Amino acid sequence: MTTHDNDQDQDEEIRSGGSIIGNFTMIPNMAVETLSNHELLLYVYYVFICGMKGRRTCKEAVRTTAKKCGFSNAKLLETRASLVEKGYVRIIREGTPNEPGVKGQTAIVGIGQMWADNFVRYATPEEIELNADQLPDRLLPDHLKRVKPQPDGDNTPQEDDNPPNEVDVSAGTPNVSVEKPNVSVEKPFQEVVSDSFQKNPL
C-alpha cells in the first residue's frame, strides 16, 4: 500500500466555527414592491417585534407602537388597516381605549402568511407547478386547482359547505331533514316562497 493510500484511510475531524448570522428580520420581497413607506415601516416593525418575542402575534399598546415608528396614533391605525386589507397583518383582537377607572383592552395583531403570494409573484410556471401542493388554490392556474372551475362559471367548491345539522333549502323544498335521528325541520311556507323567488325571479 502506498503512502497516498494510507492517507486516504485516515479519519478526519471537521469542525465548524458556527454561524454569527442571527437576530435578523426577514420579510417577503414583494413587501418592498407593494407597500408604501409607512406600510413597510409598520410591517417590518410588527415582524421584528414578534420575532424578538418568539411569537406569531404581537401584543402592544397603540401608543407604544406609534412612538416606536414615529407615527401619530391616527396614522398608525390608518396604516394598520391598510396592511390588514392587503393581507400582511390580521387583527386577532380589536383594542379598546382606556376609560376613566377602566383599563382598555390591548389589540392583538397577527402576521399574515404572505410567503405563498411572494413565491408565486416571482416563480416561473414550472416552479409553480412543481410546488402546487404547497400553494392555496387561489394562487394556482385553473389547470392546477384542486377544485376545478365549473363550465357555467360557478366556481363554488364541490365539497359540502353546509355545517352539520344546517338545513339545506337549495332545492326550495318545504320539508327538509337534518342529520339527526327522527328529527324533521319544516320551514314556514312564507320563507320557502321567498327563497324560491330569490333563486328564480320572474
Image: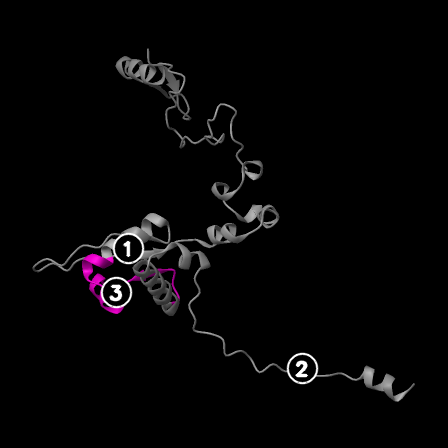
**Badge 1 element:** helix
Residue 54's quadrant in the figure?
A: bottom left
Residue 67's quadrant in the figure?
A: bottom left
Q: Amino acid at mark 3?
A: Thr
Q: Earlier in the sequence, mark 3 or mark 2?
A: 2
Residue 119 visible in the displayed image: yes
What residue is pinned by disc 1? 80
Q: Amino acid at mark 1?
A: Arg
What residue is pinned by disc 3? 65
Does 179 appear above or below 84? Answer: above
Give the farthest residue toward the left.
100
* Label disc, if present, on residue 137 of the rendered structure: none
Q: Amino acid at mark 2?
A: Ile
Q: What residue do we see at 22% from left, 61% from top?
A: 62
Q: What residue do we see at 50% from left, 41% from top?
A: 137
Sort mark 2 into few (<14), some (14-19) or many (20+) by Cα contacts within 10 Å: few
- The magenta stretch is 54-76
What residue is pinned by disc 2? 14
Residue 91 visible in the displayed image: no
